[in-house]
Each structure stands twice: as structure tokens, then as C-alpha cells.
Image: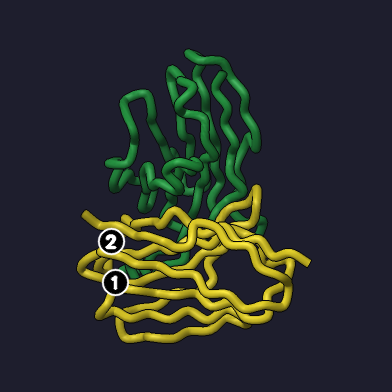
């Protein structure tokens, strides 16, 4: 398996532009997570999906952020309009969630997308 | 409020030496604690996971301990190697079924030859 695939790996954009980050989870995994990592705040969970359904988006910073998972093999995180404070590394992770193991499921992270908003 | 505090923030050691990283948490009710290793420019990779009933777990040269009473965990690295240079992140999850983990800020470890 190729692992979690994220694209692009690097994105540089200007303030006000729309940014779309993409993620392909590991085949067979049914949970998908979007994280943001900065030096100041560390890793933060933005949103997670289970069976393509958003379960908790309480970590999404504001309405400028939106995430979709149209099918089991693809998810997007969109920022519109982007701001310099959105500059961070965005990680996507997936796991195989079973009813009994819950939070014991290991999450497998992608390589991340480094976003720079000028 | 659930919190995870890690110390030290950064650590520099010589190759071959041992080191111990600390993690204190206030997450309740506790379900499990996981240590991740994050190499520069890459995503975190799980090293160990510990549940309430476990107090020691090893993964090669990495040994994690858990004291659920004092809400403390440590990650001990034995005979460090240059490849151990990375950020080590402590993550605590509350109760079975919860997918909202609480992350520590990580300890940055540098191993010098």
C-alpha cells in the first residue's frame, strides 16, 4: 500500500486566494482526519470523518475552512479566502475504525502539505 | 480542560547515550496514551500505545511507561542513534470511542555523533 497520499506537498499562495488540499486515505480505512501543525500550537485536529460522514468539525478554525469527503478514497480541505495566519503544515491521516477499539485505532499520517500564504 | 504537557521542549544528546522524555496529562476519563515519532518533513508515526492497565511497553530501543495514578508517561530511548533525531509527540485519548485526542507540543530530540 502507498500509504496516505496528500497533494500538493507544497503550496504558496497570496492572501485572499482559495486553497484546496487533497487527500487519498489508505484503501480500506473508514476514518479520515485533517490536522494542522504549527510551531506555536503543535498538532491540532480540524475535522474527522467516519464512513465519509463528518463526525466532529469543532476544530475547524472558522467558516473560511471547509472539508468534504465525497467517497471513501478522497477528501479535500478548502480554505477560502486564505490568510497569512493559515500558513502551516496540514496533515491528513486515516485509520480503520472498529466499533470495539474506538480511539485505540492507529492513525496513519500522510506526508503533509506545507502551506504558505503571503 | 484536557491538556498534555511535554518536557523538555528540546534535548540534545550524544550518540549512544540514553534519554527520557516526559509527558503529563489531565485528560479524563483516560482511555489510552500514544507516543509518536515525527521525522523532519514527514508525518507522525506511532511508536507505542498504552491503555490504563499497562505500565510498560517496549518497541525496540524505545520503552514507554505509564503511571495512571499520577497521570504521567515517559519515553525512554536506549543507546540513541542519529536516526532518533526527531520530534516525539505524546497524545492522550479520552474514553473508548472518542476520536478527539489531545496532543502535546512535542519534544525535539537531536542526537549528535
Q: Position of residue B92 (x, y in %)?
A: 35, 64
Say which residue appears at 66% left-offset and 68% top-offset: B13
- Circles 1 and 2 on the same subunit: yes
Chain letter for the part of the structure drawn in green: A
Say which residue appears at 62% left-offset and 81% top-offset: B78
Q: Position of residue A2 (x, y in %)?
A: 66, 56
Q: Chain of mark 2?
A: B
Q: Chain of mark 1?
A: B
Which residue is situated farthest in the right direction here? B113
Q: Is residue B30 left or right of residue A87?
A: left
Q: Position of residue B48 (x, y in %)?
A: 49, 74
Contact between marks 1 and 2 (CB within 8 A): the answer is yes
Identify the residue position indicated by label 2 in the image: B98
**Dot label at residue B31:** 1
Q: Residues within 10 Å of mark 1 (few under 14, many from 20)?
A: many
The quarter of the displayed image where residue B112 is located: bottom right
Q: Residues within 10 Å of mark 2 (few under 14, many from 20)?
A: few
Q: Label 2's element? A: loop
Which image quarter holds the C terminus of chain A?
top right
Say which residue appears at 49% left-offset and 52% top-offset: A93
Q: Earlier in the sequence, mark 1 or mark 2?
A: 1
Q: Label 1's element? A: strand
User: In the rendering, what colour is chain B?
Assistant: yellow
**Dot label at residue A39:** none
Q: Does residue B77 lie above or below B109 as drawn?
A: below
- The answer to whether residue A27 is seen in the rendering is no
Q: CA distance from mark 1 to mark 2?
A: 9 Å
Q: Position of residue B77 (x, y in %)?
A: 59, 77
Say which residue appears at 43% left-offset and 17% top-offset: A81
Work out whether residue A68 or residue A108 is closer to the camera in this orientation and state it. A108
Q: Does residue B62 lie above or below B35 as drawn?
A: below
Work out whether residue A18 or residue B6 is closer to the camera in this orientation and state it. B6
Amino acid at each position: 500500500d502507498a500509504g496516505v497520499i496528500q497533494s500538493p506537498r507544497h503550496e504558496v499562495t497570496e492572501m485572499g486566494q482559495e486553497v484546496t488540499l487533497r487527500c487519498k486515505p489508505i484503501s480500506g480505512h473508514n476514518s479520515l482526519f485533517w490536522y494542522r501543525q504549527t510551531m506555536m500550537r503543535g498538532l491540532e485536529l480540524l475535522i474527522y470523518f467516519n464512513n465519509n460522514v463528518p463526525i466532529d468539525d469543532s476544530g475547524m478554525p472558522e467558516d473560511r475552512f471547509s472539508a468534504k469527503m465525497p467517497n471513501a478514497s478522497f477528501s479535500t480541505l478548502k480554505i477560502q479566502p486564505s490568510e497569512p495566519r493559515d500558513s502551516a503544515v496540514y496533515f491528513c491521516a486515516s485509520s480503520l475504525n472498529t466499533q470495539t477499539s474506538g480511539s485505540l485505532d492507529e492513525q496513519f499520517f500522510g506526508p503533509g502539505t506545507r502551506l504558505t500564504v503571503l | 480542560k484536557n491538556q498534555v504537557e511535554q518536557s523538555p521542549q528540546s534535548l540534545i544528546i550524544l550518540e549512544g547515550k540514553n534519554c527520557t522524555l516526559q509527558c503529563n496529562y489531565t485528560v479524563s476519563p483516560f482511555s489510552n496514551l500514544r507516543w509518536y515519532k515525527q521525522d523532519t518533513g514527514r508525518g507522525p508515526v506511532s511508536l507505542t500505545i498504552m491503555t490504563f492497565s499497562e505500565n510498560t511497553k517496549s518497541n525496540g530501543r524505545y520503552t514507554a511507561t505509564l503511571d495512571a495514578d499520577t497521570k504521567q508517561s515517559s519515553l525512554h530511548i536506549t543507546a540513541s542513534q542519529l536516526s532518533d533525531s526527531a520530534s516525539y509527540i505524546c497524545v492522550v485519548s479520552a474514553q473508548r470511542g472518542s476520536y478527539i485526542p489531545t496532543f502535546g507540543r512535542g519534544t525535539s530530540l537531536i542526537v549528535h555523533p
